[in-house]
Image: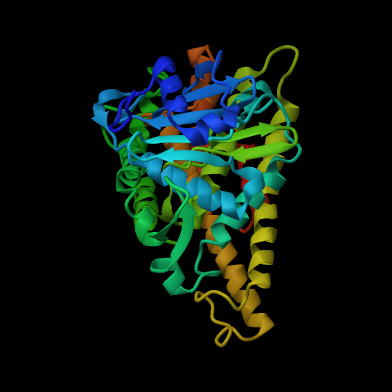
Amino acid sequence: MAFSEFKPLDDKSLVEYIKATPSLSSKLKDHLDNLTIKEVGDGNLNFVFIVVGSHGSFVIKQALPYIRCIGESWPMTKERAYFEALALREHGRLIPDHVPEVYHFDRTMSLIGMRYLEPPHIILRKGLIAGIEYPLLADHMSDYMARTLFYTSLIYHNTTDHKKAVFLIFLKTSSACALSAVAEFCGNVELCRLTEQVVFSDPYKVSEYNRWTTPYLDSDAEAVREDNALKLEVAELKSMFCERAQALIHGDLHTGSVMVTPDSTQVIDPEFASYGPIGFDIGAFLGNLMLAFFAQDGHADEQNDRKAYKAWILRIIQNTWNLFHRKFIALWDANKDTGDAYLPAIYNTSELQQLVQDKFIKDLLHDTLGFGAVKMIRRIVGVAHVEDFESITDASKRAGCERWALECAKLILKERRKFQNIGEVVSAIQQIQ
């Protein structure tokens, strides 16, 4: 079977594809009989196949030319697979312990072959719904965000490296391809446009794609659309997202893009990767933890009121930020002479360097809170919701949890500049309910 042009794969054609692809068949030691193939793509965009043989395993992810959760009525570029492979390899180079290895990429088929994160790895969001604690989560995620965001920023790079110079990655063949950094990821325009639409635009206007828990949240959704103060904040954040090429961001770093065990944390699905504001990734992750916090009452029962688990989530929010802060600054201190953002000839005293870092982190906290808040809002009154709430079967109870989360997001978005540290944010969250 020839694979010279794009076609969506199924179980049968995938076996033929593997047979024709040495970089994949070799991972199975060429034992291709009795393969177990399971399609598990429960996300919004792609096919995801788990392939397990007697001598190896991997995951195949294939981008479709439309948004899977909507259908062919909403076309979407298959090129997102290219940017995902690019980001996986660059982030994997920076922090290999927390990014699955890419084995194969086929641009024609919009297909990535990568390490299978075998059980007991599960999607973090599902673990949060189940009430499972992950003792290393804050440490691992702060590590991932600190290293990927610092080493792709102008604090580390000079402007030539950041805008024009090349880094080497291996894609379709074993030969190295030279690709520009910021310019290359500017090509991921359709996924950035999708973010602009579903995060910064649709929830604040009447849109055919918006949905919410009706009729319970009808007035809440209308209030979002009519809140001018909220819209002014969203406009500023949208401008920042579109204009600020601060670092190579994952672009969709929610709790569904992280797989975990008690001692492993793996970040997946960076198909929305682009150069953007550092706070976007941090905000997405912390905002989704806040959604998980507010969903807990909907999962409580007589055996477990989830109060202890809610306290654990708040600790993870606080620890993730504080550890990120500490690690990012440590990387900055260790690389003071490398980047063009803060030239040592200008910022030439320890006192001045401290002032610069303090201002940077304070501004970053406010950016993070803003982006986290809009991520929360869009998951309640926008197109794509989260399982944290959707798995609460009682619609009235679900709406109550969503309303608390929505009120929290609106408060944080409007008041974010008043927060001096993450502890104050956690205190504000606790006061919502």
Vertical arrangement, residue 271 with respect to residue 344, above or below? above
Vertical arrangement, residue 153 with respect to residue 408, above or below? below
Vertical arrangement, residue 130 with respect to residue 378, above or below? above
Q: Judge from the rendering whether residue 330 lies leftward or rightward of residue 390; answer left or right.
A: right
Can you give x and y, in whole percent of width and height, for residue 84 in the image?
Answer: 44, 43
Which image quarter is the C terminus in?
top right
Please tell me which residue is depicted at 63% across the width and 72% down the height of the picture. Answer: 335
Q: Judge from the rendering whether residue 11 lies leftward or rightward of residue 142; answer left or right.
A: left
Near-viewer residue (20 or 421):
20
Can the viewer see residue 427 in this picture?
no
Where residue 129 sits, quadrant-wise, is top right
Please tell me which residue is depicted at 52% across the width and 17% down the height of the picture. Answer: 37
Please tell me which residue is depicted at 33% across the width and 45% down the height of the picture. Answer: 196
Near-viewer residue (151 or 36):
36
Near-viewer residue (320 or 68):
68
Can you give x and y, in whole percent of width and height, for residue 356 in the image?
Answer: 58, 74
